[in-house]
Amino acid sequence: MKKTLISLSLLLCASSSAMAMGLNVEQGKNYSTLDAEMGRSSGGIYIDGQWVKNTADGVQIGQAGTGYNLEIGPVTLSAGAKATYIGGKKGDNGVAFPVGGGVKLNLPWDLAVYGEGYSAPEQLTNSVKNFVEADGGISWTPVGPLIVKVGYRYAGVDGKDGRPGHTLIDGPYIGGGLTF
């Protein structure tokens, strides 16, 4: 019984140290992003949630997702899926279930280059023909839990039932966050 309890305690400690939690904020010219994640900065399974608001026209995107990170030396490859709420302004309010992935390359001096893309074709949406999003940039971790980012984010839809396709989010951002 004692060995089982010790083994279980060690397993919990190992899995909790691998599942770091992070909170991030990004600010673009016309949009703001809030992001919470667990396990995103390490190998293995991760979960994350995100809210993006276009401050120019009120469009909102809410997401919850999960995926898997594979670390190969300084490179991390990820694949995942999300449940996305699209709060558009042109009659395209609805949900999408995009799938995609990304890559992160860790560089010297605590720098990293990252990029990811997700897409949901008409079969995985209820209000648009296609939902696409992409995010890429450079991050720097100057001290322990602090991360600073600069990048570019895009999200757009192709209209359905006579509604036009349009951009939801588009532009550069600066951001920061903490990983615990």
Image: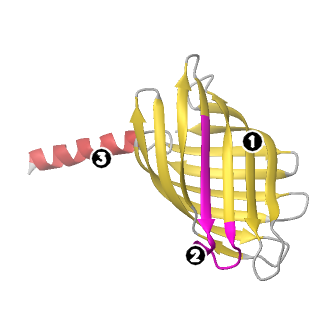
What residue range appears in magenta?
A: 114-130
Membership of 128 in magenta stretch: yes
Outermost residue on the right side: it is 56
Mark 2 → mark 3, Cα distance in angstroms: 39 Å
**Residue nearer the viewer, 3 or 136:** 136
Chain-order first, disc 1 or disc 2: 2
Please tell me whether residue 43 is drawn above or below residue 55 in the rendered image. Answer: above
Please tell me whether residue 99 is drawn above or below residue 36 in the rendered image. Answer: below
Residue 152, label in figure: 1
Q: Which residue is mark 3?
A: 12
Label 2: few (<14), some (14–19) or many (≥20) C-alpha neighbours in 10 Å: few
Outermost residue on the bottom side: it is 161
- Residue type at mark 1: give it: Tyr
* Residue found 10% across the figure and 45% down from its top: 3
Q: Nearer the viewer, mark 2 or mark 3?
A: 2
* Residue found 46% across the figure and 54% down from its top: 67
Mark 1 → mark 2, Cα distance in angstroms: 27 Å
